[in-house]
Image (spheres, rainbow, N blue to C red):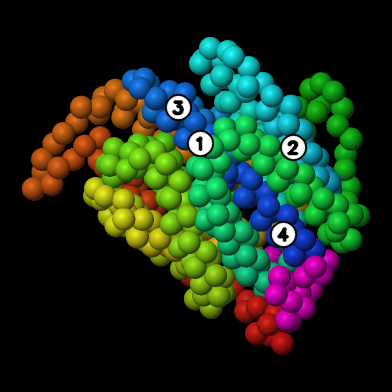
């Protein structure tokens, strides 16, 4: 698959451990930023599920509301964000979004200390998550585009593996820090740490000397108020949508992930209650899930970064998705914490394979001028499905399936394990579809192999 964008600014040195200086700075900033986000997200789930809404029949819905606040901007804002990313200096866009997120969390933190009714406290939390997620809808496609600008095509699988490792290291380190910090110091510390992490990401971006081809930006048409502006934005979105529909790789990857996210959204919504109900563990044990998953994900990211360029990113993507579905179905049957943690490790290994393969898969199939918009449309679609799935799972567990207790072929099924098993089946279907429909091509070997 040939990347049709401009030549990267920096050809990666053959022996540079982090590809090149610009990517090394980008990667280091994301290490800190991702750690802050993991601590923040873990703390919010524990705070809402184990403290604010504890003992209420609508507790699963309260946890789901945080996930909905995270996902809603991905559905509403991300398509428009893609248009502006394609018009903008992406490095400058990332700087603005990091500054906005740091300031927003810094301003909101004192408000969470006020003695207000529970519903208002939840509203402040959901509003904070909503605002941070909205800024992320501009940051993430800009980051995606920037990686394509400063990393050669041959090294994109390795860059994707390193980026995936960044997040997974955060999931290993963050939750064990989040739980004791929450119970010892309160939830406000998670907000402070998250704000500081965005500040660090901002500083690493400022330290970059090379800015990619956006330093000499593609010709921009100044937007004018009114109908002309709206028409131009819609036309640019339409161009990206037409491309996504007709580009086989983008279309198949999007459809397969949409099917898979029907399952992933269920896990996101119910994971806390899976730990406390099905695994019969304490709320603090929820903090062990991400480290187990993250440990496997680190191994999986490093393996996938090496394997994907050799066996093909399409094969890696499809087989990894099937593995994720099988792991989730097996996980659903667990009733104690220790074996479940072992399965979470394997879950993380195969999940990273799909994530690492996705970036070079999309970059290789998308023209440079459309990357921001295609990225936005792609993740809007899967986020909409995840949003629907999370909300539906929280509703079903709280109402329709609340008292489910069935016996089939000697197995006992309750509401959460039934929903998780169905989720695993959805992910397997998505992976099988990708295997059948994606072209099984190899990508170029890395610059280290070429040298």
Mark 4 and mark 2 in contact (Cβ < 8 Å)?
no
The answer, for residue 158, to whether it is visible in the render is yes
Q: Secondary structure at mark 4?
A: helix
* Segment tinted magenta in the rendering: 2-21
For the residues marked 4 and 3, what is the alpha-carbon distance in whole angstroms? 34 Å
From the viewer's perspective, is residue 32 above or below residue 300?
A: above
Kindly identify which residue carries mark 3. 51
Name the main secondary structure of what is drawn in magenta. Answer: loop
Mark number, residue 183: 1
- What is the quadrant of residue 362 in the picture? bottom right
The residue shown at (70%, 32%) is 105
Kindly identify which residue carries mark 2. 102
Q: Secondary structure at mark 2?
A: helix
Mark number, residue 305: none
- What is the quadrant of residue 403 in the picture? top left
- What is the quadrant of residue 2 in the picture? bottom right
The residue shown at (43%, 23%) is 53
């Amino acid at each position: 698959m040939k990347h049709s964008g401009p030549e990267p600014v920096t050809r990666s040195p053959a022996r540079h451990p982090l590809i090149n200086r610009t990517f090394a700075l980008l990667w280091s900033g994301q290490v800190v930023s991702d750690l802050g986000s993991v601590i923040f997200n873990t703390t919010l789930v524990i705070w809402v599920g184990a403290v604010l809404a504890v003992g209420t029949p609508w507790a699963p819905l309260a946890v789901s509301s945080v996930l909905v606040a995270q996902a809603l901007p991905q559905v509403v804002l991300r398509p428009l964000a893609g248009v502006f990313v394609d018009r903008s200096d992406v490095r400058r866009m990332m700087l603005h979004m990091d500054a906005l997120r740091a300031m927003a969390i810094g301003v909101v933190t004192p408000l969470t200390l006020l003695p207000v009714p529970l519903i208002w406290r939840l509203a402040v939390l959901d509003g904070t998550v909503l605002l941070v997620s909205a800024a992320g809808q501009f940051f993430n496609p800009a980051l995606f585009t920037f990686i394509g600008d400063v990393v050669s095509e041959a090294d994109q699988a390795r860059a994707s593996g390193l980026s995936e490792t960044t997040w997974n290291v955060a999931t290993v380190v963050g939750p064990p820090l989040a739980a004791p910090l929450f119970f010892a110091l309160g939830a406000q510390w998670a907000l402070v740490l998250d704000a500081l992490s965005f500040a660090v990401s901002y500083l690493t971006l400022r330290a970059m000397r090379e800015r990619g081809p956006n330093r000499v930006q593609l010709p921009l048409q100044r937007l004018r108020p009114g109908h002309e502006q709206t028409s131009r934005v819609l036309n640019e979105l339409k161009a990206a949508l037409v491309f996504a529909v007709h580009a086989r790789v983008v279309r198949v990857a999007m459809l397969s992930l949409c099917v898979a996210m029907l399952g992933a959204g269920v896990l996101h919504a119910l994971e806390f209650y899976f730990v406390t109900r099905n695994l019969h563990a304490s709320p603090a044990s929820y903090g062990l899930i991400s480290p187990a998953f993250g440990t496997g994900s680190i191994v999986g990211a490093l393996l996938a970064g090496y394997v994907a360029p050799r066996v093909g990113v399409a094969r890696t993507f499809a087989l990894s998705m099937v593995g994720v579905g099988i792991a989730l179905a097996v996980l659903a049957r667990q009733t104690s914490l220790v074996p479940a943690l072992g399965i979470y490790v394997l879950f993380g290994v195969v999940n990273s394979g799909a994530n690492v393969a996705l970036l070079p898969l999309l970059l290789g199939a998308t023209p440079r001028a459309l990357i921001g918009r295609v990225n936005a449309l792609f993740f809007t679609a899967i986020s909409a499905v995840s949003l629907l799935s999370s909300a539906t799972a929280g509703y079903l567990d709280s109402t329709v399936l609340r008292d489910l207790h069935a016996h089939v072929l000697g197995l006992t099924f309750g509401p959460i394990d039934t929903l998780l098993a169905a989720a695993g089946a959805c992910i397997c279907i998505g992976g099988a579809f990708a295997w059948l429909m994606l072209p099984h091509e190899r990508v170029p070997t890395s610059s280290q192999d070429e040298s």
